[in-house]
Image (cartoon, coloured by chain):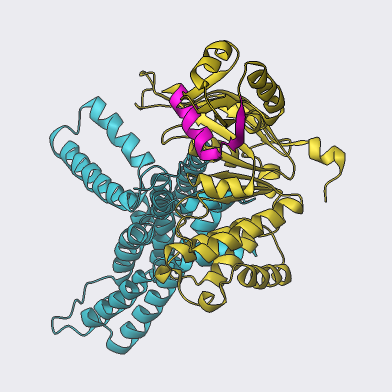
Chain colours: A yellow, B cyan
Amino acid sequence: MSSEHDIRTAVIECNNLTKVYRTTWSGRSKGICALQDISLRIRVAQIVGLIGPNGAGKTTLLNLMAGLIFPTKGHVAICGHFARSMEARQSLGYMPESPAFLGTYSARAVLKYHGALLGLSRHEINQETDKLIGQLELQEFADRPCSGFSQGMKQRLSLAIALMNNPKVLLLDEPSNGLDPIGIIKLRDLLKQLRDSGTTIVISSHRLGELEKLTSNFIFLYRGQVVSFDDRLVSDQSGHLRIEVISGGNDITKQLQSKYSFLAVSDTKLTINVTGEEHVPNLVCDLVNSGARITSVVLERENIENVFMRLYNERV
Amino acid sequence: MKAYELIKETYLRKSLFRIIHVLWLFIYASLFLAPWPPELWNWGQFLFGWSGCVLPILLSAGIFGDDIATGRISVLVTKPVKITELYIYRILGLSLQGTLSLLLSAGIIFILHSATNRGSIDHLGLWLLAAWLLFNNFAILSTSISVVLRRANNSVALFVGIIFVYILFVSMMSFARENPVVVMVMDILKYTFPPFELLYKFANGRYELVKQISFVFHTVVLTTIYGLVGIIILNKREFRCVRD
């Protein structure tokens, strides 16, 4: 487990990150701004979900972290090193959205090949290969050519490659693509284990429900900008307070509408937006003081899907 | 281990071309056994033409372009491998393919010539060396083009480029040989384009040793420059995970 000091250390650091894709060779046109002035720090042993609508800049941010593309402005540091440096790559495991392998190679040969690229000895390569084949349940396909692999098998093999040599930082682009439900559950457990052992994981995914089971840390991107990040998004997990009263719902609303945000009102039912559960007791007191005769109070928390939709609708 | 795996991967990547190697050996055999004996043929020239020019274009097809197009390169460049190493080991794998093909072809030519006494194997060693130098020159030029172009377009571009330059060269020689601008363009082409002519002269063995060495030196320098350009572009380029 990581120490107190380690937990506060930023493993991934983006400072004023801007990425503009040129649309012409001459570079005369303005180009497409995929990311705009992004600054964020991701601490050790964290799982962070990278979310946002299509074209928000998720893959661009992941590519910048992986050192696959260069920032137009600003910089990315992985474990304190420039993202494309050898030192950064020593600490990095990357899984692309659409993995591709040499078709003639078997899964075992692919893993050995990548083990060699990591500079492992023959003994270490064999040990790591056997461990990962077991961990990701690739035994049945280990010696078959990759060309015949299903999408799910490719994803598992790609994850095994990313996990070789226990990276400190794991960047995953849609890791559960093509996985069956059992595969998804096992992937989730594996990622939690890795986080507990100190690995920092950044996942770009559209499967919000899956991400929510892994983490409460999200980076919401919209049109190349961070709309919400980390604790802000967590505290944004507000909810709705559904209150049932005997009667007079409309009168109560008139008295309190300057103080609270009423989402739905009828004579017997009130739905009020709350930004955190700590506000509930005061709200209930105010309702009672306004003469409400409450029969039921239910706090419905927003899940990440609701937060996503709310943030998206706010922007659109 | 790293070098071994990268060289092996390059060596094994175009399994289809093993068939081309074998086919070529059959062509050699059929030429030797043809009813119309090519008495004046120099077998070294065949080696030079096929293994020096055609084979590298075929073997280097998509050497980086395939990785870039499939997105495979995005995983390779996140591993702690210097991009220069990646380029050099790919070239070594390619060169190994060429070397083995050349040696095998030369061995077969030698055996068939000894058995049939058809054609000539004069300066076969020099032709072999010239073909090897030309193979590497073409292979490295094609690899450097592959850093920029997707899939196997590097080979197509090189093939079309050679034909274009050849036609340009012949046209200039025929119609405007005395024009100073044409002379300058021809000189530039002669010294920056793959040194086909110089190595041909070298393999003929008609020049003195110093000149022969200078031909080889020029080829090595040109090959190194092609390689350096490829390495610089590969280091500077981005690898977006967008598949074609």
x and y percentages locating residue A182 in the rendered image:
54, 66
Q: Position of residue B90 (x, y in %)?
A: 50, 57
Is residue A222 toward the left or the right of residue B81 in the image?
left
Q: Kindly identify the residue that appears in the image at 23 percent across and 71 percent down.
A: B41
- Residue at the location (54% across, 75% down)? A142
- Reply yes or no: does residue B19 show up in magenta: no
Residue A169 picture location, percent across and down:
67, 46
Closest to the observer, A302 or A31: A302
- Name the residue nearer the viewer: B72 or A249: A249
Q: Nearer the viewer, residue B6 or B192?
A: B6
Residue range (magenta): A293-314
Tally of numbered tags: 0
| Residue B82 at least partly seen | no
Q: Is residue A89 toward the left or the right of residue B70 in the image? A: right
Tell me the quarter of the image containing the C terminus of chain A. Answer: top left
In the image, residue B85 sits, relative to residue B232, either above or below, namely: below
Q: Position of residue B89 (x, y in %)?
A: 55, 57
Residue located at (44% from left, 56% from top): B136
Residue B201 lies in quadrant: bottom left
